[in-house]
Image (cartoon, grey):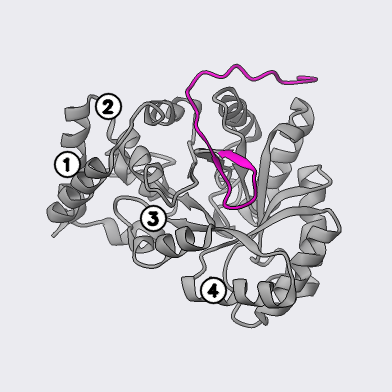
Amino acid sequence: MHAHWTPAYLAPVEYRLLGRTGVRVSVIGLGCGGFGGVGSDAGLFGRGESEEEAFALMDRALDLGINYFDTADSYGGGTSEEMVGRWLTSRGVRDSLVLSTKVFNKMGADVNSGGLSRRHILQAVEASLRRLQTDWLDMYVTHQVDQDTAIEETLRALDDLVHAGKVRYLGASNIEAWKMTKSLWISDRAGLARLESMQTEYNLLHRTAESELLPFAMAEGLAVTTYSPLAGGWLTGKYRPQEEPPPRSRMSLRPGPYSDLENAGTFRAIDALQFEARELGVSSAAIALAWVTSHPAITAALAGPRNVEQFAAVVESLTVKLAHDDRERIGNRMDEARA
């Protein structure tokens, strides 16, 4: 147990403004979705990182100057928040971190134990604060879009949390640009705290966000944080044709979100990425991370290493500087390879 943790910054971490908030976050954030489970999948609770492994990952992130930690109430069924909370208390670093968690997924058997109703949000935030052992959240993020609750009800409940001092800023994950537009319009009209950030998947193999979400975020001054910057490990080159995925890898535990990538075109694209990596003298994972963070709309990419050794690609990515032409070349080469 450490009474107080003193980070030893080992890498040239860049800090970027979180939208219009004035808060700065590290360009790489720590995704805590693997602590005690594999995301929100109830069938995999207990299959993620142990508390000892999670503590080692958080210690390493802090050493690297990563100040943005992202979790959710449903990760590991609440276990991720509990591990983060115990770590925060043991290290004494709460004030140094920008802590984000999410609300939406069902957290119990009760019919009202999920969604974005006022009732559930007010219950969920108290449970998250208890698990995280903190009095406030820097970011509170809606995990999914709730088709059954009026946006204004959700926004008013979130606004109350900001005024109560329990939440500093608000964000939305997995939301379409038009729904974010409607949300901002309602907030502006009603004088409510607005959503300041969006979280979306974005990587060299999943580029849908480029069509509407990223240009919209830039126009509105919104932060964008991305998950799966390595496409569940695909962009590291760890998966090969006709080979079983490595034990405990994303494809061995939860292949569903990446099943669209299991084809010859993806492997050709990864070969193209590895060619680019050799040309630059770095790993393909480092280039893939740097490619995401070099987009002008991106505030931070969430890395979810399974062990401390996997931070090597994060450290390496911080030294890779890609110009606009580099991004275009790499993206085009991979798209052509997939065609």
Q: Which amino acid does label 3 sit on?
A: Pro
Dot 1 crowding, Cα within 10 Å, few <14, some 14–19, many 20+: some
Query: What residue is at 51 percent from the left and 65 percent from the top?
Result: 174
Residue 100 at x, y percent in the picture? 65, 49
* Secondary structure type for disc 4: helix
Say whether disc 1 or disc 4 marks the residue closer to the N-terminus: 4
Say whether disc 3 or disc 1 marks the residue closer to the N-terminus: 3
Q: Can you identify the residue that label 2 sits on?
A: 282
Q: Distance between the residues labelled 3 and 1?
A: 21 Å
Query: What residue is at 30 percent from the left and 50 percent from the top?
Result: 204
Say whether disc 3 or disc 2 marks the residue closer to the N-terminus: 3
Q: What residue type is labelled 2?
A: Val
Q: Can you identify the residue that label 1 sits on?
A: 271
Looking at the rendered image, the disc whose residue lies closer to the viewer, 3 or 4, is: 4
Dot 2 crowding, Cα within 10 Å, few <14, some 14–19, many 20+: some
Q: Can you identify the residue that label 3 sits on?
A: 255
Residue situated in front as seen by the camera: 144 or 237: 144
Residue 329 at x, y percent in the picture? 18, 45
Q: Which amino acid does label 4 sit on?
A: Thr
Do we see residue 53 in this rendering?
yes
Task: Reply yes or no: does residue 311 show up in magenta.
Answer: no
Looking at the rendered image, the disc whose residue lies closer to the viewer, 3 or 2, is: 2
Q: Can you identify the residue that label 4 sits on?
A: 181
Among the 4 quarters of the image, the one containing residue 320:
top left
Q: Distance between the residues labelled 1 and 4?
A: 39 Å
In the picture provided, is 334 more to the left or to the right than 255?
left
Residue 6 vertical placement versus 143 (above, below): above
Start and end of the magenta stretch?
Answer: 1-25
